[in-house]
Image (cartoon, grey):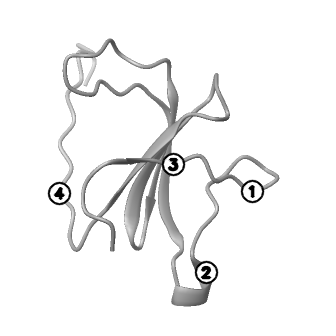
Amino acid sequence: MVVGLREFALRTGDGSPALDQSNGEEIMHVQPSVAVALGDRSVESPGTLYITSRKLIWLSDADVAKGYAVDFLSISLHAVSRDPET
């Protein structure tokens, strides 16, 4: 397991992330239209967030060479919505 955030751009032909299927990794959830902000950098253009059985992966929709991944043992998610309808 790699510790911490790392660049990740391995995609399959359909644009989804290349997984470690030999070790049983599978996609558990896909969330489109997710923007990320890392540290004090500006917000990245929207991409797709993938939660697999082993890592969290964000892949840019605008730049196929841009993406990030974080391995995890367990995961907790928190989201903020500014939609007054929710």
Q: CA distance from mark 3 to mark 2?
A: 16 Å
Q: Which residue is mark 3?
A: 8
Relative side of 78 to 54, left or right = left
Q: How many marks are shown on the rendered structure?
A: 4
Q: Amino acid at mark 3?
A: Phe
Q: CA distance from mark 3 to mark 4?
A: 21 Å
With respect to residue 49, does 1 lie above or below?
Answer: below
Viewer-side residue, 33 vs 43: 43
Q: CA distance from mark 2 to mark 4?
A: 23 Å
Q: Which residue is mark 2?
A: 21
The residue located at (33%, 74%) in the rendering is 1
Q: Which residue is mark 1?
A: 12
Between marks 1 and 4 in the image, the one whose residue lies nearer the viewer: 1
Q: Earlier in the sequence, mark 1 or mark 2?
A: 1
Q: Which label is found at residue 33?
A: none
Q: Which residue is mark 4?
A: 76
Q: Is the residue marked by circle 4 packed among few (<14), some (14-19), or many (20+) residues within 10 Å?
A: few
Query: Dot 4: what SS?
Result: loop
Q: Amino acid at mark 4?
A: Ser
Viewer-side residue, 71 vs 79: 71
Q: Amino acid at mark 2?
A: Gln
Q: CA distance from mark 1 to mark 2?
A: 12 Å
Q: Is the residue marked by circle 1 packed among few (<14), some (14-19), or many (20+) residues within 10 Å?
A: few
